[in-house]
Amino acid sequence: MTKVDLMVLGLLSEQPMYGYQLKRVLEEKHADLWSEVSTGHLYYTLKKLKKFKYVVEKTIRFGNRPPRHVYSLTDGGKKALKTGLDELDVHTQRLFFSLDIVIAFAKALSLPAGKLELIIQKRKKAVEGEIGEIKNAWRDKVITDSMSLSEYLIFEHRLSLLSAELKWVRWALKVVKGIDYRTLNATDFKIDGPYPLPK
């Protein structure tokens, strides 16, 4: 069961919904800022959950409007949601970054002087952009007085992680300024990081 499956089952556990309504609720919750959910795969996910009999689809027609396909959770879906949430690796989950792989194998890329700096600069812009998106979403929730405690905890979690990464990125940009891959093999470096080395 994927995290997207769990997100959809979780929303349907709150109330039956049609596809577009699910999409709208995910957007209102700013789920794209804190989860791997993609609204583009929403209908595929619903179809898959229906195949596994975790959801049932009911067609409802309102007057002259086109019919809506409303999805609701089955007992099997409720059980799958509970089992899936219980089995999520929340205790030992580690964060891994593609950037660290590029740094580790910079020699294989034969990165010329200044190239690593440009790569890290791109990451810095991406982190700043993500922080801006989260703060804007947060601001909207505060203005409309619609932020739940769970959303507050999630937003704080994301901001804390991103702020720590931004601190590292700013430091790393000073360290790699103008260097090439050979400098990364040095063991006699003198630069102190944003966090002290253990002694």
Image (tube, rainbow, N blue to C red):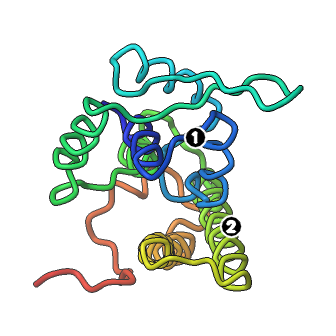
Q: Amino acid at mark 1?
A: Met
* Foreground of the two, 132 or 89: 89
Mark 1 falls on what kind of element? strand
Mark 2 falls on what kind of element? helix
Residue 68 location (% of width, % of height): 70, 27
Rendered image: mark on residue 133: 2
Name which residue lies at 89% across and 26% down.
64
Q: Is residue 156 above or below residue 51?
A: below
Name which residue lies at 15% across and 81% down.
198
User: Dividing the picture into quarters, in which one does residue 106 lie?
Assistant: top left
Q: Which residue is mark 1?
A: 17
User: Dividing the picture into quarters, in which one does residue 125 lie?
Assistant: bottom right
Horizontal relation, residue 111 to residue 48: left or right: right
Name which residue lies at 43% across and 58% down.
183
Q: Earlier in the sequence, mark 2 or mark 1?
A: 1
Name which residue lies at 46% across and 34% down.
72
* Distance from the alpha carbon under mark 2 to that under mark 1: 27 Å
Residue 83 location (% of width, % of height): 18, 41
Residue 40 location (% of width, % of height): 65, 31
Q: Is residue 189 above or below residue 93?
A: below
